[in-house]
Image (cartoon, rainbow, N blue to C red):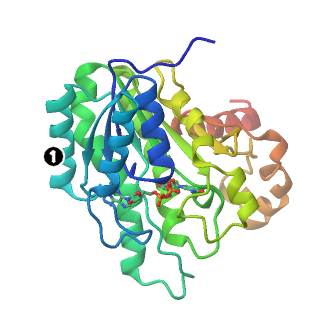
Amino acid sequence: MSEIRFDGKTAIVTGAGGGLGRCHALELARRGANVVVNDLGGSVDGSGGNSEAAEKVVEEIKALGGKAIANGSSVTDDKGVQKMIDDTMNEFGRIDIIIANAGILRDKSFTKMGMDDFELVVDVHLMGSVKPIKAAWEIMKEQQYGRLVVTTSSTGLYGNFGQTNYGAAKLGLVGFMNSIKQEGAKYNIKCNAVCPVAATRMTESIMPPAMLEALKPEYVTPGVMNLVKEDAPTGMVLSAAAGAFSMSQIRETKGAFVGTGDALTAEAVAAKWDQITDDSTMTHFEQGGGHTGNFINLIKEATGG
Ligand code: NAI
């Protein structure tokens, strides 16, 4: 296996003042990238903040002999995001990699959740990933090179009590990835998602100490390096925890053609339920057209057309 290097490349990592983002930023720098360390520096719920956290990581990178600049903007602030992009271009002249990692939590049951907590979490995770990517999009197109990573979560893929806001935002990012990978393909812009589990301040209160010890955030980062390398895949959700990795995918059954006109009743659908839900026939589609094509095939098979 050849060494994965990022010499001459510039990477922006959002929320890189601590936790997973810091590990990604340090590793990119170790492997030769110029790194922009973004972090608002607030608390887990998104309140407060200053650029100290980002500056500390920049110092760590410089101590390793790497090149980095700090950015204390919120990923939700249009002007701050634009400044981050402008500063990156002024300092390094390119933007090759964006790892959208910044995030907060406002956990509450849906019954108790205020819409302000819902909107803020969606804003930081979803819009806070979209905005930096949008601001760098034309630059990446021009360069004919871009590697994007969004950070999803098992809550988005599968759900978790008390995290309706977070789950909606996190699966929204997978939806974003699925379409942007298609728009970026002809410009050599690839987009993937990482679905991590790691001991960070975000999770330290909900996991036992032994588990936290096994779930070092730096154990996720080698997977992420594979999502931003030159020959990275695109449209992949890589799950990562404690040094183990897997692929997560949305799949669907082949399904069944029930009929049309008078033959298409609720009872007729119920009669084919076993076939509709037969998970031994699961497939993954690379794009929405594959989903529609599957239905066309079912109709053709059933009608001989
Ligand atoms: P963390 O709290 O250590 O890191 C998040 C960072 O984002 C913080 O340094 C914070 O200051 C920064 N941030 C928050 N709002 C920001 C904003 N508006 N602008 C710029 N920076 C902002 O937590 P962790 O665990 O490292 O989380 C990183 C990402 O991984 C998040 O997107 C999180 O949702 C995701 N994740 C983490 C999991 C875990 O097990 N730790 C599980 C699944 C997903």
| Image position, residue 73 (x, y; %) | 24, 55
Position of 8 relative to 225 (above/below): above
Seen at 56% across and 71% down, the residue is: 163
* Residue count near mark 1 (Cα–Cα under 10 Å), binned few <14, some 14–19, many ≥20: some
Seen at 34% across and 55% down, the residue is: 53
Question: Is residue 190 visible to the viewer in this orientation of the structure?
Answer: no
Q: Quadrant of residue 39?
A: bottom left
Residue 147 located left or right of residue 226: left
Seen at 59% across and 76% down, the residue is: 162
**198 vs 268, nearest the viewer:** 198
Position of 111 relative to 283 (above/below): below
Quadrant containing the N terminus in the rendered view:
top right
Tell me which amino acid carries mark 1.
Answer: Lys
Quadrant containing the C terminus in the rendered view:
top right
**Residue assigned mark 1:** 83
Residue 284 located left or right of residue 135: right
Check disc 1 and report its element: helix, strand or loop.
helix
| Image position, residue 242 (x, y; %) | 70, 46
Q: Quadrant of residue 123?
A: bottom left
Seen at 55% across and 28% down, the residue is: 226
**67 vs 145, nearest the viewer:** 67
Residue 92 located left or right of residue 252: left
